[in-house]
Image: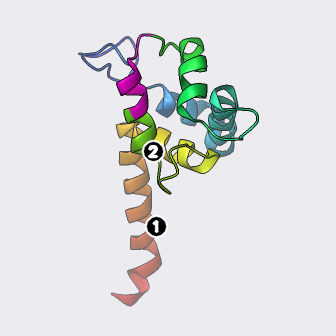
Amino acid sequence: MASKNQFPQSESGFEDLLPAMACKLGGQGLIGELCNGFNLLMDREKGVINFESLKRNAAALGLGDLTDDELRGMLREGDIDGDGALNQMEFCVLMFRLSPQLMDASRYCFHECLRREFRDFS
């Protein structure tokens, strides 16, 4: 099912707006906005997003209807170092991973860069 713009909407009604943000803001602008999102969700004292801060602030981002298990699952999915919380880098990586279009675009750019870099060796 397609939404009004070029970005598809999932069956759950989630519309991935990160590609549109990336186009409009550029790379640095998108990272800045992701950092702003991290700051909204993080525990101010600990400087990370933990279960308590995610649960407390999720409603502000439209995630208020998620269960505790779903919130814990989000944390587990992004928790690269296994400390039970998300630092800013883990959060940004998770946001990219959750955006299929951005992942596809990054794969394309990566392969294109490799092709250009190594064309002299063929």
Residues in magenta, as a range: 65-72
Q: What is the image's colouring?
A: rainbow
Residue 64 at x, y percent in the picture: 48, 11
Q: Tell me the quarter of the image containing the C terminus.
A: bottom left
Mark 1 lies on a secondary structure that is helix
The amino acid type of the residue labelled 1 equals: Cys
Q: Tell me the quarter of the image containing the N terminus.
A: top left
* Residue 8 relative to residue 105: left or right: left
Is residue 23 or residue 52 the one in the foreground? 52
Residue at mark 1:
113
Real-space Cα distance between discs 1 and 2?
27 Å
Quarter assignment of residue 53: top right
Quarter assignment of residue 69: top left
Is residue 94 or residue 81 the one in the foreground? 81
Residue at mark 2:
78
The amino acid type of the residue labelled 2 equals: Gly
Residue 38 at x, y percent in the picture: 64, 34
Who's the residue at 47% across and 48% down the image? 79
Q: Main secondary structure of the magenta part?
A: helix
